[in-house]
Image: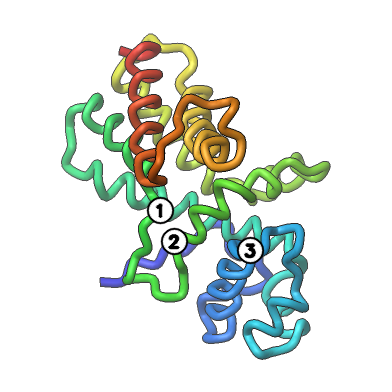
Amino acid sequence: MSYFIQLKTTENISLRDPNETELGRKIISKSIYLIDKIGFEEFNFKKLANEIESTQASIYRDFENKHKLLLYLSSWYWSWLEYIIKMNCNNIHNPKEKLDIIIRDIAQLGASDPNIPHVNESALYRIVVSESSKAFLTKNIDKEVNKGYFSSYTSLCLYISNTIKEVNPNYPYARTLASNLIETAHEQIFFAEHFPEVTNLICAKNSQVNEKIEEFLQHLVHKLVY
């Protein structure tokens, strides 16, 4: 069963929906591959055009610039993460159990989904960890928020904060904690790999880092909310 997510922000971020054409899907697939391989700074549409064996003009029909492309990829990831969380929380009525599932999914996601063949979720996960902050740490952030470019991230944070409020209606910082759970998980993964002096979450195997991050987030939430 295919469950490709149609983003609310697609029309605003991209000039047209890249998922509607074979070339558009190739642009998404190869941009994920390239950004994961060489980094966002070195990535450009000329290199992407070479990968998709087309022209830069064909890419510009879908995206105005590489910043918009990074926004799109990040937004897709947040929508996909919210979908996975909601699917795993379906029919779970205990809010504490739901919150534990949310924390697990935030910390552990990174496996590819064969139902969406043109999106390598493992590579996209690495991009979100290392590159997604570059999508919003810009001078145009206020304008882009007002245009709805970050609605998928906002929706995910709202779902998490509502679950926190279910666990403890009196906890006053539910939205703050929700966004911090997401950002802390990704920052600690990045630190464990590149900046180990500032984290305790160091393991010999990368898979164990995710497990340690889940333990840390659970510890944080249990201390603050329960």
- Disc 3 marks a residue whose amino acid type is Ile
The answer to whether the residue labelled 1 contacts the one labelled 2, judged by CB atoms less than 8 Å apart, is yes
Location of residue 46 in the rendering, given as x and y in whole percent from the top left corner: 77, 78
Please name the residue that numbered disc 1 is placed on: 110
Residue at left offset 60%, top offset 48%: 130
Please name the residue that numbered disc 3 is placed on: 35
- Disc 1 marks a residue whose amino acid type is Gly
Please name the residue that numbered disc 2 is placed on: 121
Residue at left offset 18%, top offset 28%: 94
Residue 106 in sight from this viewpoint: no
Task: Identify the secondary structure beneath mark 3.
Answer: helix
Location of residue 131 in the rendering, given as x and y in whole percent from the top left corner: 64, 50
With 193 as the anchor, is 138 left or right in this view? Answer: right
Location of residue 95 in the rendering, given as x and y in whole percent from the top left corner: 24, 27
- Depth check, front residue: 150 or 117: 117
Q: Earlier in the sequence, mark 1 or mark 2?
A: 1
With 116 as the anchor, is 133 left or right in this view? Answer: right
- Disc 2 marks a residue whose amino acid type is Glu
Q: Earlier in the sequence, mark 2 or mark 3?
A: 3
Instruction: Specify the quadrant that holds the N terminus.
Output: bottom left
